[in-house]
Image: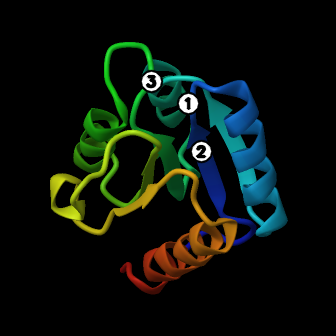
Amino acid sequence: MRYGKAVVLVVEDSTIIRMSAVDLVFSAGYEALEACDADEAIRILESRNDIDLVFTDVQMPGTMDGIKLSHYIRDRWPPVRLIVASGEAILEESNLPTGSRFFSKPYDNHAITDAMAHLLSIGNSTGC
């Protein structure tokens, strides 16, 4: 088990929204990393072994959207928790990997931080 602050990777192509989400992560007491698209997010995930949760947008430029990214992360890094948000797509959580949470934009900051706390507590309570 790793001790210290949980690490959250924010994946969002809009600089303003990404900065706001990073501030939200910091205010919730977590360490925040940021990526502007799925390709950058994957490079960060490949270079670090301490990312606990990915908070991603659905629509973004690059080789994959947030839905494909969340499935890729679940397949390659199963312990990483996932929160997916979108201002345009309304998704059924059944379209996302098991255990993921979906929020429509604009989202309520308290709902996001509550979901982070819940998902991270699940992540810390399981293991060998």
Q: Earlier in the sequence, mark 1 or mark 2?
A: 2
SS at badge 1 = helix
Q: Earlier in the sequence, mark 1 or mark 3?
A: 1
Establish if 83 lies above or below 77.
below
Specify the farthest residue to the bottom: 125
Q: Give the Cα separation between the discs numbered 1 and 3.
A: 17 Å
- Disc 1, disc 2: CB below 8 Å? yes
Which of labels 1 and 3 is toward the front? 3
Q: Which mark is residue 60?
A: 3
Which of labels 1 and 2 is toward the front? 2
Quadrant (top left, top right, bottom left, bottom right) of the C terminus: bottom left
SS at badge 3 = loop
Picture coordinates of residue 127, whole percent (x, y): 38, 78
Which residue is drawn at the image coordinates 33% and 14% (left, top)?
63
| Disc 1 target residue | 44
Residue 82 found in image quarter: bottom left
**Crowd class of label 1 (few under 14; some 14 to 19; many from 20; radius 10 Å):** some
Which residue is drawn at the image coordinates 44% and 28% (left, top)?
42
| Disc 2 target residue | 9
Residue type beneath disc 2: Leu
Picture coordinates of residue 71, whole percent (x, y): 24, 43
Q: Give the Cα separation between the discs numbered 1 and 2.
A: 9 Å
- Disc 2, disc 3: CB below 8 Å? no
Establish if 11 lies above or below 98.
above
Q: Is residue 124 left or right of residue 33?
A: left
